[in-house]
């Protein structure tokens, strides 16, 4: 069996890259989750401050960091960087209390949704950067933006402090081939931030197997990022959250979900990246003198006290009054969503069952189905979505999107066959921002006619048809290619997707007399 890997050697930094010392005291302060305050060159940069519950009152920062909020609000910040619109990075209750004169550094997304939201909040001094574009607010301080260059709207920031390079990737997946190198400190996600598989209705053993696979994939992706950036130190960040609502308490099981603590990965990481220093912090830690993990914070007693302190906040969602969504309202909402995404949907169709507090509808989506059909009994639905009426009302009224609702873990899902439908989930997640689904259309067209690479005697599309990862960094074993981002797999002889979804990969054999060196051979 032939095996090829584009991952590189197991040691993440060479002998010429001895671990460097951390920045000067006070230079970088961790606020918890993906939040930081960076002080340098007489300026203060505030990054992704998150303190209040997110996603329908479901997610809370872990550990509790609320005691830092007064200092953050009172701080004389010159710059504010917000990576994306997810509520565990975009805490509107904090932003509303910040000085509107602050200079806001934002990623340039196709939808302009982040720029518009900040403008609506009164932040008009904006520096909007595209992928790999830089801004130098002071001679010894340079900020460089890195985007997920696919249809997803995520970003990371490289902060250069007079040569000390801090890369804050949070939960952004910049293509591996686009990552910067020579990084002193990498801050990146290790825990999951997705509803799959724990929100799906799987038998217990199946759920455990799928959860283990996702956790393994998360770890693999992290190791690749560490090695490719040459990071000398790594800070586990951007998760996991904690679920204080007792109805969601099962997602606090660190062994059975994709929301583990760093302990679960620490030994394997030390083996995979033996020369990379791991910096574990508590909220408020100065990175020059981190306190490290605090065992007390991981106990049930700590969680119970945290739940009591925030009871008013996690109960607030359940106390909201809302009128049930009528079939006519749902019909109009879904018709509007489809009308905004006609080119994206093409001739796709899907039968979906929606259940909500005792009501059940069969919804036929897709252009060739004509009008949306509501039936008393579902007709062999491929997807079933269980959504509480209170959540459905918020979605139909535009208060939240499906993305936020799914991340809340307040929805239940099932699919038969158990195959991911990229079009359906993209319609729900991105349909309110057609700029994103139009980018997916362009990605499809690029897959058919775009840039190619040659590997193992096969010419294939360079970028993954699922989420745009550069397949020059994909592993190939026994004729099967595995994307390094979400670990979808394709047969190289046919392009058939054999794991992950149903989207094929464009492949064609390279004649022996024309075959050149494998792209991974440099």
Image (cartoon, rainbow, N blue to C red):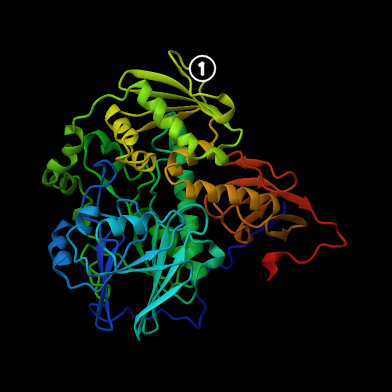
Locate residue 414, reporting x and y percent: 45, 29
Judging depth in this view, the residue of 323 and 335 nearest the camera is 335
In this rendering, the answer to whether 454 lies above or below 482 is below
In this rendering, the answer to whether 402 lies above or below 467 is above
In this rendering, the answer to whether 114 lies above or below 331 is below
Please tell me how crowded label 1 is: few (under 14), some (14-19), or many (20+) other residues with Cα within 10 Å. some
Does residue 42 appear anywhere in the picture?
A: yes
In this rendering, the answer to whether 463 lies above or below 143 is above
> Total of numbered circles in the picture?
1
Q: Quadrant of residue 289?
A: bottom left
Residue under the point 28% across and 80% down: 40
Judging depth in this view, the residue of 314 and 283 nearest the camera is 314
Q: Residue furthest bottom?
A: 139
Judging depth in this view, the residue of 499 and 508 nearest the camera is 508
Q: Quadrant of the C terminus?
A: bottom right
Locate residue 271, reporting x and y percent: 46, 63
Say whether residue 455 is left or right of residue 341. right
Q: Quadrant of residue 344?
A: top right
Label 1 residue SS:
loop
Locate residue 46, reporting x and y percent: 26, 68
Q: Where is mark 1, residue-wise?
A: 379
Judging depth in this view, the residue of 127 and 426 nearest the camera is 127
Residue under the point 49% across and 41% down: 426
Say whether residue 174 is left or right of residue 162. right
Residue under the point 35% across and 47% down: 259
Does residue 262 appear anywhere in the picture?
A: no
Residue under the point 22% across and 29% down: 322
Say whether residue 275 is left or right of residue 507. left
Q: Residue furthest top?
A: 376
Locate residue 232, reporting x and y percent: 42, 74
């Amino acid at each position: 069996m032939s095996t090829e890997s584009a991952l590189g050697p197991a040691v993440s930094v060479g002998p010429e890259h001895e671990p460097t010392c951390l920045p000067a005291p006070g230079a970088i302060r961790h606020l918890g989750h993906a939040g930081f305050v960076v002080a340098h060159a007489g300026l203060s940069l505030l990054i992704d401050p998150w303190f209040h519950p997110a996603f329908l009152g479901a997610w809370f920062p872990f550990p509790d960091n609320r005691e830092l909020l007064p200092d953050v609000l009172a701080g004389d910040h010159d710059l504010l960087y917000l990576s994306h619109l997810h509520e565990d990075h975009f805490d509107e209750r904090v932003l509303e209390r910040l000085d509107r004169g602050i200079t806001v550094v934002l990623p340039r997304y196709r939808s302009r949704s982040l720029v518009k939201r900040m403008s609506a909040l009164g932040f008009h001094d904006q520096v909007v950067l595209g992928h790999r574009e830089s801004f130098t607010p002071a001679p010894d301080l340079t900020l460089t933006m890195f985007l997920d260059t696919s249809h997803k709207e995520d970003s990371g920031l490289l902060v250069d402090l007079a040569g000390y390079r801090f890369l804050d990737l949070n939960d952004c997946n910049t293509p591996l081939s686009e990552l910067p190198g020579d990084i002193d400190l990498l801050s990146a996600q290790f825990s999951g931030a997705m509803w799959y598989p724990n929100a799906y209705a799987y038998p217990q053993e199946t759920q455990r197997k799928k959860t283990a696979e996702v956790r393994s994939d998360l770890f693999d992706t992290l190791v690749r990022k560490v090695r490719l950036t040459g990071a000398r130190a790594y800070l586990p960040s951007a998760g996991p959250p904690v679920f204080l609502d007792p109805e969601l308490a099962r997602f606090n099981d660190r062994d059975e979900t994709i929301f583990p603590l760093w302990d679960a990965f620490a030994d394997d990481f030390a083996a995979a990246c033996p020369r990379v220093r791991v910096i574990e912090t508590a909220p408020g830690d100065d990175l020059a003198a981190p306190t490290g993990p605090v065992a007390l914070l991981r106990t049930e007693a700590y969680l119970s006290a945290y739940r009591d302190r925030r009871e008013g906040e996690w109960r607030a969602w359940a106390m909201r009054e809302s009128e049930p969504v009528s079939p006519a309202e749902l019909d109009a909402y879904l018709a509007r969503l489809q009308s905004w995404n006609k080119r994206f949907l093409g001739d796709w169709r899907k039968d979906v069952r929606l259940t909500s507090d005792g009501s059940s509808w069969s919804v036929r989506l897709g252009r060739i189905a004509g009008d949306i059909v509501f039936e008393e009994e579902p007709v062999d639905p491929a997807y079933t979505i269980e959504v509480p009426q209170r959540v459905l009302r918020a979605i139909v009224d535009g208060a939240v999107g499906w993305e936020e609702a799914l991340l809340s873990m307040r929805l239940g899902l099932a699919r038969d066959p158990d195959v991911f439908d990229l079009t359906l989930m993209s319609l729900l997640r991105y349909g309110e921002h057609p700029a994103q689904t139009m980018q997916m259309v362009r990605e499809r067209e690029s897959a058919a006619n775009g840039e190619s690479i040659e590997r193992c005697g096969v010419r294939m599309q360079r970028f993954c048809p699922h989420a745009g990862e550069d397949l020059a960094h994909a592993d190939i074993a026994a004729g099967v290619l595995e994307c390094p981002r979400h670990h979808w797999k394709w047969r190289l002889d046919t392009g058939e997707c054999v794991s992950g979804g149903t989207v094929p990969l464009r492949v064609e054999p390279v004649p022996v007399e024309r075959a050149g060196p494998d792209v991974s051979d440099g």
